[in-house]
Image (tube, rainbow, N blue to C red):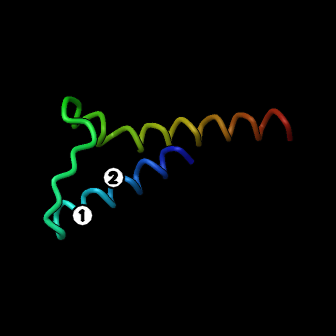
Amino acid sequence: MLGVFLFVIKMVVWTLNKFAGASITLVADAPYVMNFLPLILMVIAGTASDKLKKIYR
């Protein structure tokens, strides 16, 4: 859920920067981390969810 939230925030900020002329910077020092952080969190959450589902089935 956190990965989806970060992805949505990233897309909103990108849209504002692209179309509204805003100049919002989330993390200036780590642009590559911000690009892949939502994906990494979604993969980790999916893996953990699958393991928990197998344990408590």
Q: Which mark is residue 5?
A: none
55 relative to 33 in the view: left or right: right
10 relative to 6 in the view: left or right: left
Q: Which residue is mark 2?
A: 10
Residue depicted at 39% across the width and 54% down the height: 9
Within the image, what quadrant is residue 29 found in?
top left
Amino acid found under the numbered disc labelled 2: Lys
The C terminus: image quadrant: top right
Helix, strand or loop for disc 2: helix
Q: Which residue is mark 1?
A: 16
10 relative to 50 in the view: left or right: left
Image x and y of residue 26, in percent: 27, 42
Along the line of sight, the residue nearer the viewer: 5 or 24: 24
First in sequence, mark 2 or 1: give its number: 2
Within the image, what quadrant is residue 45 found in?
top right
Helix, strand or loop for disc 1: helix
Residue depicted at 21% across the width and 50% down the height: 24
Task: Categorize mark 2 by other alpha carbons within 10 Å: few (<14), some (14-19), many (20+).
Answer: some
Image x and y of residue 41, in percent: 48, 38
